[in-house]
Amino acid sequence: MAAVARTAKNTAWNEVFALVLLGAGTLLFLALISYAPKDLPAWVWFSKVATPNSPAQNFIGPLGAIVAGFCYFMIGAASYFLAVVLLGFGAAKLFHAQLNVSRRAGWIALFVVSGACLLELQSYYLRDWHSAFNIQGPGGWVGDSFGHHLLQRVMGRVGSIILLAGLYLTSIILMTGLRPVHIVRQTVATILRGLGDFREWRLKRSMRQADLKGQLEISQRELAKQQRSIERQLKKKGAPVPEASPAPAMISTEELANRPKPKVVDTTALPMELPGILKKPSLAELRGREMDTKAIEGLTNQKWDAENYTLPGLDLLDEHDVEGRVAADPAELELIQQTLIDTLAQFGIAVAAGDITKGPTITRYEVYPAKGVRVDKIVSLERDLARATRAERINILAPIPGKDTVGIELANSRKVMVTLRELMQSPDWTGTKAKLPIALGKDVYGKTIIADLAQMPHLLVAGTTGSGKSVCINALIA
């Protein structure tokens, strides 16, 4: 408890001392800027006025005029250095209580004295202060005595200025704790960071204004720049720069000749309205056996002819979502596929173009790896491929089951809704042999995924709140 109380007391005194420094610096600054030699009383020994101003024009009154006159007489324009020191250390002490000002008093004195001597030795500015303030020069008595009469006679004007400049900079470093090299580094880093932010802003603006082809070209240029930057950094560190393997650099003409011609398939096209599918078979046909009428009557309070029951028509379901089902542009899809091929080539992996299949939510780009290329290398470049194509999501199938190609699946920027009516109008649904069929959706190739609920021992429907679990169950029951 005693230690806590002592710490609190020290903190309070530190704040008081900081406020005293701030107050003294403010008063001195106001006295200096409003100083007039005629404000000095006649009894002041450095006053040359017989009849002083009454009242004094100084902001701090006669006392301020005396203090400002004494500072000007002793150190000249370096008086403002003293005011800045008081204000600076007062603010620093207020926010950093552990700052010890007394240990820096010597460096503060050297800072003020060397500054006064430099002001006295320079011959371009403040030369009229001699007559305006009735002082010996811009550096006051200290600057005239030590700078002009002592150092200049011993070392000359140039040597004195060099020596005083070194002492002045040294006093600033040791007084404030600032490191010029660190300041320069921070300044350069800030400028470079600002240039990088500006370049990133220009890149984003160009991406917003460009079409899909232009965005891909910009992405390719940025990827090449980043690769060159990494190579330069590796050279500086002395690390060996990885070179592209010459073996898989290109695919031979013989390999390309043996490959089938790539196809572009859009599975999001609207299905045909097939006639004769608006009615499902009767319940008796689905079950394949006679219904127990008594059992049905036990479940309901009224008679129900289950054998002749007809399922509702598909016209009760919403029509297909025509919006967003714009036919895919093969040129754009092929351009994205070429970007993937070029990106892999930059890492020494040669592939040939395969089929392109656009699904409702993703588009699968198939590529044929060259001989000797391990598919694991393609999988390891998933993030680089996503960066090159600026894809929201990417998935790599290496290889595609049942095929000799690698599938790179990119999320579509515009998703297409797959409706329940579309699933129930598909030939896969109408031709299924399942006893209790349920339509789960479509795969990337447009094939309706159908499961048989009768063969499932359990069915788990999981999802977050509001994702549609209840609607899914209601659709299965219906």
Image: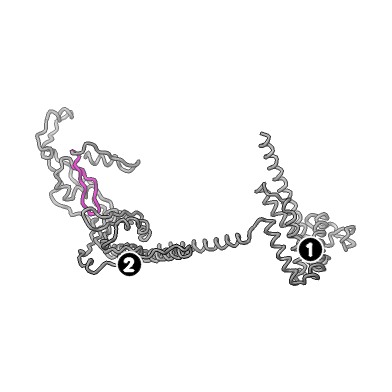
Please tell me which residue lies in front, 181 or 472. 181
- Amino acid under label 2? Pro
Q: Which comes sooner in the sequence, label 2 or label 1?
A: 1
Amino acid type of the residue that numbered disc 1 sits on in the rendered structure: Gly
Q: Position of residue 163 (x, y in %)?
A: 73, 66
Helix, strand or loop under label 2: loop
Crowding at mark 1 (Cα within 10 Å: few <14, some 14-19, many 20+): many
Name the mark on residue 215.
Answer: none
- Work out whether residue 123 or residue 328 is closer to the camera in this orientation and state it: 123
Which label sits in the foreground, 2 or 1? 2
Task: Identify the residue position indicated by label 1 in the image.
Answer: 76
Q: Position of residue 101 (x, y in %)?
A: 71, 51
Is 355 a magenta residue? no
Residue at mark 2 to residue at mark 1: CA–CA distance: 76 Å
Q: Which residues are magenta?
A: 437-454
Q: Quadrant of residue 459?
A: top left
User: Which residue corresponds to the image point at 65% horizontal and 48% vertical from the top-left?
Assistant: 96
Q: Residue sitting at 11 percent across and 33 percent down?
A: 291
Horizontally, residue 281 falls left or right of residue 385, namely: left
Q: In what element is the residue under mark 1?
A: helix
Compared across the picture, whether 382 is left or right of 190 comes to left
The picture quadrant where one finds residue 248 is bottom left
> In x, y percent, where is residue 360?
27, 54
Q: Is residue 452 magenta?
A: yes
Structural crowding at the residue carrying mark 2, measured as other residues with C-alpha within 10 Å and reported as few (<14), some (14–19) or many (≥20): few
Q: Quick one: quadrant of the C terminus?
A: top left
Prevailing SS of the magenta stretch: strand
- When the figure is inspected, residue 424 is found, relative to residue 149, above or below; the finding is above
In the picture, measured across the screen, residue 58 lies left or right of residue 417, that is: right
Residue 331: x %, y % from top left: 28, 65
The residue carrying mark 2 is 246
